Image (cartoon, rainbow, N blue to C red):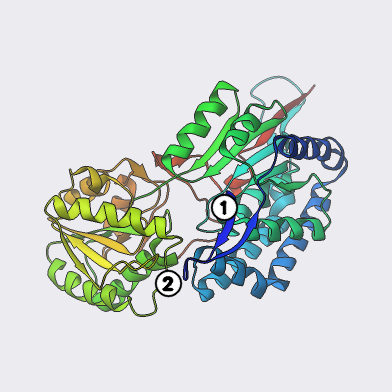
Amino acid sequence: MSLYAVVDPATGEGVKEYPTATDDQVVAAIASAHDAFTSWSKTTTVADRADLIRKVAALHTERRDELAAIIQREMGKPLDQSLGEVDFSAAIYEFYADNAEKFLADEPISLLEGEGSAFIRRSAIGVLLGIMPWNYPYYQVARFAGPNLVLGNTIVLKHAPQCPESAAALQQIFLDAGYPAGGYVNVYATNEQIASAIADPRIQGVSLTGSERAGAAVAEIAGRNLKKVVLELGGSDPFILLSTDDLDATVAAAVDGRFENTGQACNAAKRFIVDESIYDDFLAKFTDKVKAAAEGLSPLSSVAAAQRLAEQVARVVEGGATLDSAGEVNGAYFPPGVLTNVDPESPTAKEELFGPVATVYKVAGEDAAVALANDVPFGLGSYVFTTDADQALRVADKIEAGMVFINAVGAEGAELPFGGVKRSGFGRELGRFGIDEFVNKKMIRVS
């Protein structure tokens, strides 16, 4: 089988294979992107580029049903969530179209002494390499491509091997929107070819969303070649529940926070850290809701993904934890479950569980909750539920994470920066900060 292939996780059947790029094709892709940067990017205005990215948004909306069906076929995403991903991606492109000129306007500097003026002028740096994952095939690309194409950078994009059809659909959208051939270039490249691409002097930066291992490998190569990287890696996000005046609504939020994309989201709520005063009631209601989610649950992205999760869960149970689950693993279908009595110091407790399994802990108060929340290598997102507004902000300040959502899940937006700390990576995407990563902030001093 080719490295790049669509295999329907619901059936395990191969749908279509795509040829892996040759070395010459990868080199040609970089050359094309570099040519586009030196010509198209240098001769267009921010307004011109905003108009193009707005067309990308419109084409997502126009091809909404087709795009959603593709990713449902590729990685098993429920159809309603697939449609939602297409819509959110369109909103991201629209956001940067609307705000590009404001974000990229000259920024004056107040001089401490001397006559004249000074300002910062933002400009593109060149060809960027994007390495994207399978769990959000359109959204992840939008976060990276939207701001950088408006800025004037050009893009070579390597998508996940199981997402070749959505990768091709995106390539066609950028071409149909009016981008030059090298403005956005999809490549079905191998890891070895990507390592060579990072070292190519025409590549000026790399953005990767993926695993810790992939991030470390890319960062190592980029560091040797003095290339900036943005990394969005794994997460084991805490959902801290200290108090509630509506337990049913809080349980519903907890289930939604865990089961988005069948639990396959880096920033999903994964560890539920509950104050002892409401632990028993929460656990009973939460477990019932989780097990009820088995009916109609979509498959994981692949049989291999289900097997990896099963191995992790088995290790936790062997270490003394209790699993309350709704069934057995069947192909790529993984039964939803709740883990309790997990030793927080066990190796598996420090890992990310990528699927419909939640871990629930009982803690005695705010300080214990924060200590447990921070006791993992990750620091991507977090969720704090409490009826005490002062406590919410106090806990938010103490959490070691790039994002904190108070009394809400699913509250992400195109305007809100996304990214983490610790082993969840570095750099930000989306919002004002997303356009400020791969940019030359050129200081100009006028006397």
- Please say whether residue 414 is visible from this viewpoint: no
State the residue lying farthest toward the front: 1
Q: Position of residue 7 (x, y in %)?
A: 53, 62
On the picture, is 293 further left or further right than 5?
left
Between residues 352 and 390, which one lies in front from this camera angle? 352
Amino acid at pointer 2: Ser
- Please say whether residue 375 is visible from this viewpoint: yes
On the picture, is 392 further left or further right than 43?
left
On the picture, is 100 further left or further right than 252?
right
In which quarter of the view is residue 341 placed? bottom left
State the residue lying farthest toward the top: 114
Check disc 1 and report the residue beneath it: 1
Q: Please state, as top left, top right, bottom left or bottom right, where the C terminus lies in the image.
A: top right
The answer for how far apart the CA atoms under marks 2 and 1 are is: 25 Å
Q: How many C-alpha atoms fall within 10 Å of the one at disc 2: few (<14), some, or many (≥20)?
A: many
Amino acid at pointer 1: Met
Verify CB contact (< 8 Å) between mark 2 and mark 1.
no
Q: Secondary structure at mark 2?
A: loop
Between residues 155 and 26, which one lies in front from this camera angle? 26
Q: Position of residue 238 (x, y in %)?
A: 30, 54
Q: Which is closer to the viewer, label 2 or label 1?
A: 1
Residue 121 versus residue 170 in the image, above or below: above
Q: How many C-alpha atoms fall within 10 Å of the one at disc 1: few (<14), some, or many (≥20)?
A: few
On the picture, is 133 further left or further right than 188?
left
Q: Earlier in the sequence, mark 2 or mark 1?
A: 1
For the image, the number of numbered tags is 2
Which residue occupies 73% across, 44% down? 151
Q: Position of residue 250 (x, y in %)?
A: 29, 72
In which quarter of the view is residue 162 placed? bottom right
Check disc 2 and report the residue beneath it: 298
In which quarter of the view is residue 38 placed? top right
Q: Position of residue 141 (x, y in %)?
A: 61, 53
